[in-house]
């Protein structure tokens, strides 16, 4: 099973990198872009075939290491 | 007194710390490799600055799982004095020994310069020899020093006098302009509720002797030594 995990700063927490990217986009003429949020993308293979157990394991990984839940939120997809 | 200086892969201020402990304080500095699981015989612990594990994932996120961290948690829970400087502070946050988290500096730049910090609480083992409100000039060197915590935790930090250092102007005014990195409430250093664990972003070990042209950082190490001696005296008397 493959897990695709996105970690981003929680909404409401200032994202200086997102702001800088937004400004750069605007400078380049992309005036329609707003609320840019910069995050991390992680991919991993999981030796687990049960959807429920895989989900529980990925969630535990996010809570324990991959995201700092004081400032970040995470979401994931699982594909067989 | 015996000061343990923890060495993670990527620590780079450990030698500065051991130098200050041995040459400036005249005490014993013991480098402790991060794989150690015992801190027996040590009176205080310093987590030095650097780039543990290359700052991969988040600053301090991987170092917090080093074997020595279990021993540090026990040491701290028994009242032992733990000082985290810069990356050491970031590791203490990730480990949950101090509340909050670090965000990227608001400017997105790595900032390496002298800043001024105000001693907001001089009644701690780390600042006992300072005057309350004293201004120290100490260098910072970091990209992730923008302290953040939720409003409830911030209120608790303020109410319990856990904010020990705030970024300020040279004459001690805590203003937005004096804040180098966007840190919440100009926070440069905090302690835990019990008062025996302190983290700060500035580097006192880089300015602890006259020959460097600035010895403002020395008072933090001297305060620690003073507190340790006092504690030892108490146990002898008891």
Image: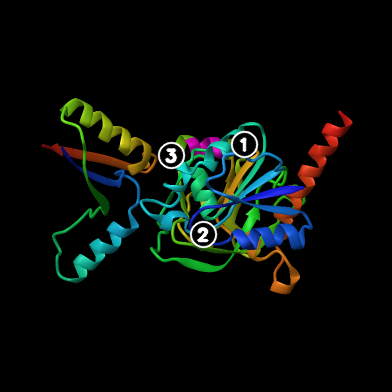
Mark 1 surroundings: few (<14), some (14-19) or many (≥20) residues within 10 A: many
Residue to which mark 1 is pinned: B76
Mark 3 surroundings: few (<14), some (14-19) or many (≥20) residues within 10 A: some
Q: Position of residue B67 (x, y in %)?
A: 51, 41
Residue at the extreme left: A80
Residue to which mark 2 is pinned: B50
Residue to which mark 3 is pinned: B150
Figure quadrant of the C terminus of chain B = top right
**Residue under mark 2: which chain is it in?**
B
Asked if labels 2 and 1 share a chain, the reply is yes
- For mark 3, give the secondary structure: loop
Q: How many marks?
A: 3
Answer with left or right where residue B191 lies relative to residue B65: right
Q: CA distance from mark 2 to mark 1?
A: 22 Å
Q: Position of residue B237 (x, y in %)?
A: 89, 31
- For mark 2, give the secondary structure: loop
- Give, as a single range, the part of the protein colored magenta: B153-157
Whichever of callouts 2 and 1 sits on the residue coming sooner in the sequence is: 2
């Amino acid at each position: 099973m493959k897990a695709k995990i996105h970690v981003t700063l929680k909404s409401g927490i200032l994202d200086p990198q997102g702001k800088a990217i937004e400004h750069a986009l605007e400078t380049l003429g992309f005036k329609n872009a707003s609320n840019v949020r910069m995050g991390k993308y992680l991919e991993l293979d999981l030796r687990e075939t049960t959807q429920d157990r895989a989900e529980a394991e990925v969630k535990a990984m996010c809570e324990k290491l991959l995201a700092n839940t004081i400032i970040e939120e995470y979401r994931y997809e699982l594909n067989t | 007194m015996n000061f343990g200086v923890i060495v993670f892969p990527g620590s780079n201020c450990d030698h500065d710390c051991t130098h200050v402990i041995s040459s400036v304080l005249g005490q014993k500095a013991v480098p402790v490799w991060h794989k150690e699981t015992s801190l027996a015989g040590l009176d205080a612990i310093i987590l030095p600055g650097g780039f543990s594990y290359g700052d991969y994932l988040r600053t301090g996120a991987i170092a917090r799982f080093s074997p020595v961290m279990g021993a540090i948690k026990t040491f701290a829970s028994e009242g032992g004095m733990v000082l985290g400087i810069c990356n050491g502070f970031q590791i203490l946050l990730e480990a949950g020994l101090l509340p909050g988290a670090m965000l990227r500096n608001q400017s997105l730049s790595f900032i390496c310069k002298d800043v001024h910090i105000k001693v907001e609480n001089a009644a701690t083992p780390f600042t006992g020899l300072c005057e309350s409100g004293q201004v120290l000039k100490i260098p910072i060197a970091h990209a992730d020093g923008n302290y953040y915590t939720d409003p409830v935790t911030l209120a608790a930090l303020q109410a319990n006098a856990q904010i020990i250092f705030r970024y300020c102007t040279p004459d001690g005014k805590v203003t937005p302009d004096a804040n180098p990195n966007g840190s919440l409430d100009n926070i440069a250093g905090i302690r835990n509720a019990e008062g025996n664990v302190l983290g700060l972003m500035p580097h006192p070990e880089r300015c602890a002797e006259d020959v460097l042209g600035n010895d403002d950082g020395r008072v933090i190490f001297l305060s620690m030594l003073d507190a340790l001696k006092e504690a030892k005296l108490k146990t002898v008397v008891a």
